Image (spheres, rainbow, N blue to C red):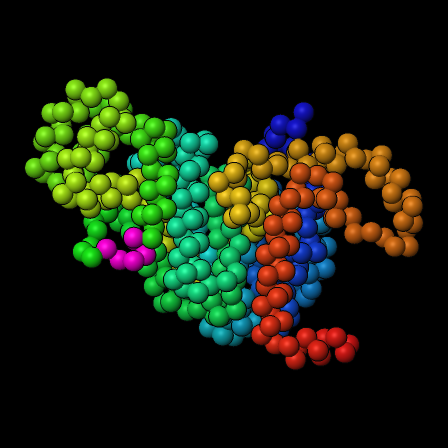
Amino acid sequence: MAEFEPGSLPDLLPLYYRRLFPFGPYGRWLRYGDVPKNYFQRREFSFTLHDDIYVRYQSFSTPQELEKEIQKICPYKIDIGAVYSHRPIQHNTVHMGAFQAQEKELVFDIDMTDYDDVRQCCSSAEICSKCWTLMTVAIRIIDRALVEDFGIKHRLWVYSGRRGVHCWVCDESVRKWSTTLRSAAVEYLTLVKGGEQTIKKVILSDPIHPFIRESLNVVKEYFEEYAIVGQDILGNKESYDKVLALVPEPVRETLQKEFCKKRNSIQRWELLKNKTEKFNKAQWEIMLQYCFPRLDINVSKGINHLLKSPFSVHPKTGRISVPIDLQKLDDFDPFAVPTISLLCHELDKTGNYQAAEEQNEGELESPRRNRDYKKTSLAPYVKVFEQFLEEMDRSQKQKSPKARDVQMDF
Ligand SMILES: [Zn+2]
């Protein structure tokens, strides 16, 4: 009944935007405490409408205006862009060259298709609970580095709705980063290099960089269960030859001869570990090539690059782009993320209760309809989003106690 049909999107979106999309916290996020002047007004939003009609450079005076417009046009997809020098809606009236992207969250896009050479269970747009471990590992590695190596505080990790995750780094100083700084950060976080033609994509330096050492500790926690057991990367000749191609020459030959005598991946991995003991790096290079996060550099480095908004619907799967609770990262299940059809169905079921409640409240109060998500399985994800916002509020207040007093005087 709540199975998602892409064709039903035009029927479901009006309800979703009218009663479920959490416009309250969403507007609070993008206003950033209204400290930088006209910040919200200078933000680009882009909408994908029916038939892949794509509208760029939309901007709004207030979050309420954005809400009204979204409810009116019911976009299939919402993208968030940069904060520009001028209101994006007026970009044609501004003198050429003067219209510039000035600020944006630092964003990361990790997509499962970039791991196709190292996963056996699925390919291209498919994902399953087995390969999802790669996303868990990626989030843990990148997030640790953001916090401990970069000193970043405010990260919002979001499920893309289909086959990957996004990260929005929202610290005030980071939003001002230049393209050069963004590129440098991605460069720091990149290890797996080379395209389809490259066989060995990870070559460790000596000594190993502290960031890689920390990342390796994360990979070690997951590798055997994920790659050896789950993906069975040493299970047959075709797949273990790919692994052996990463091992240095003298050991490779020995292993090649002995691998066919072993029965399964686990036994072969034990053998490989023993034989490569003297070159520990060989073992680690395999682990990292199979598990280390693969970032889309272009998404992160361009200030004016657009990224799908949190709480936007994925038009193909119907799943909502929901924030991920890092405290429960290992339990995050992309298949448990609600689809728009499930949410609308849940809302239908609460219909009677809803009517009664509204009668009690009376029309004068006019409760914000889009708080109805609280009655659906979207609620826990909005809560994660609100916790993220509370953290940001706290930092904002610590930073400018005076600004807060002024606000209170009003
Ligand atoms: Zn899979």
Name the foreground residue: 289 vs 49: 289
Among all residues in the image, which is located at the extreme left? Answer: 250
Quarter of image, res 280:
top left
From the top left corner, tell me how far across and down residue 385 is, in percent: 61, 52
Q: Relative to 185, is 289 above or below?
A: above
Quadrant, the N terminus: top right
Q: Is residue 1 left or right of residue 190?
A: right
From the top left corner, tell me how far across and down residue 209 is, in percent: 26, 57
The answer to whether residue 52 shows anywhere in this view is no
Quarter of image, res 265:
top left
Q: Main secondary structure of the magenta part?
A: helix
Quarter of image, res 76:
top right
From the top left corner, tell me how far across and down residue 178 is, in percent: 41, 69
Task: Name the residue rendered at 62%, 59% in the picture.
Answer: 389
Quadrant, the C terminus: bottom right
Task: Name the residue rendered at 87%, 45% in the picture.
Answer: 358
Q: Which residues are magenta?
A: 208-213
From the top left corner, tell me how far across and down residue 298 is, in percent: 38, 55
Q: How many marks?
A: 0
Task: Name the residue rendered at 57%, 45% in the picture.
Answer: 321
The answer to whether residue 209 shows anywhere in this view is yes
In magenta segment, residue 209? yes
In magenta segment, residue 163? no
Q: Relative to 151, is 314 above or below?
A: above
Name the foreground residue: 12 vs 333: 333
Q: Is residue 61 left or right of residue 232?
A: right
Task: Name the residue rendered at 66%, 61% in the picture.
Answer: 28
Q: Is residue 148 left or right of residue 245?
A: right
